[in-house]
Amino acid sequence: TPGPAGSTTSCSLTRFLIEEQRAGRVGPDLRLLIEVVARACKSISIAVGKGALGGVLGDAGTPGAASVNIQGEAQKKLDVIANDVLLEANAWGGHLAGLASEEMDHSMPIPDVYPRGNYLLLFDPLDGSSNIDVNISVGTIFSVLRCPEGVTTPGDEHFLQPGTAQVAAGYCTYGPNTTLVLTVGHGTHAFTLDREIGSFMLTTRGMRIPEETREFAVNMSNQRHWQPPMQAYIADLLAGTTGPRGKDFNMRWVASMVADVHRILTRGGIFSYPLDAKCEAKGGKLRLMYEANPMSFLVEQAGGAASTGRARMMEVQPSGLHQRVPVFLGSRAEVEAAVGYHLEHD
Ligand code: AHM
Ligand code: MG
């Protein structure tokens, strides 16, 4: 098989998926689903890449009346474009029973005019919205679940499955290059878009997150709003070599979860969006179903850990499609350290 770590033998996403199918790790419908999502990501990549030339920057809606999504956030034109691309691409293939998106109030069963399949797809079409207009990496995040047995017209309740039920998850980052990172439950693999031939090529088979790290990602401007465990944890990281952790830590915060997680999958680190006084009432800032869970699946499959601070992320029983959670994920030992502070303060 091509593409062991460090191998230069070229392997496209298509070939990778066919070989996964032969190995019994993906069925034909899941393979088609991933191919379709990857193709949609290519179109989103092209739209994002046009920037100001494509007339795609700025807010959606009309001037003075920007459109707002279910989260109460102003939608960017590219949020809406990316959502439409993913809906259109996935509607007719016959692999899905329904879809759910950060940008839509409720899930959507596949229209009756098309055959329905056995999978449910959830996505954040364009994560990192605050970075769209300033030419900083943004990305698409997706999660795939099985449609419960016997359900032909899925509703929101059928999507409320814990992260451990995911059959595939991934993201695509639109940055200096476009990279798709994917898991079907057998490792986490990265595919870089070869823009000349238009194919995603396997560039890292079996990503591994280093156990230990000296790098953390958090929005430090929220410090005064954090709860005591988070205050104590970050204070100890900032204390450096003379503090209880005995080492200096560096900080990075892109404010696009996709870009921050991509860095962590590449060189380690811990990403956190804890509870704070501003987001406490909502349960957190980031969304469980199409942000935290797919990222947790990818991170665990690369040897890392993902937690709410108090429980394994993928074991959280969801109660709502747009439910929010506190997030800690990345290098295993560092996530365990952060969880330790929470347990100590409870
Ligand atoms: P979005 O889905 O509306 O783009 O919000 C999610 C983003 C994450 O990508 C990022 O980690 C976080 O929100 C940034 O938050 P902040 O604005 O506090 O820096
Ligand atoms: Mg998002």
Image (tube, rainbow, N blue to C red):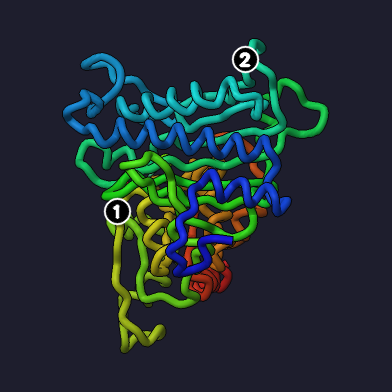
Label 2 residue SS: loop
Q: Give the residue type that dot 2 points to.
A: Pro
Horizontal relation, residue 177 to residue 322: left or right: left
The answer to whether residue 283 is seen in the rendering is no
Residue at image location 27% in from the left, 42% down from the top: 131
Horizontal relation, residue 295 to residue 246: left or right: right
Instruction: Establish whether ligand 1 lies closer than 8 Å to the Cβ of label 1.
Output: yes
Find residue 34 and report its image quarter.
top right
Image height of 103 relative to 227, above or below: above
Horizontal relation, residue 239 to residue 106: left or right: left
Q: Give the residue type that dot 1 points to.
A: Val
Residue at image location 41% in from the left, 52% down from the top: 276
Q: Position of residue 307 (x, y in %)?
A: 56, 60
Q: In this figure, which residue is indicated by the disc labeled 2?
A: 111
Tag 2: Cα neighbours inside 10 Å, few (<14), some, or many (≥20)?
Answer: few
Residue at image location 64% in from the left, 28% down from the top: 96
Q: In this figure, which residue is indicated by the disc labeled 1?
A: 254
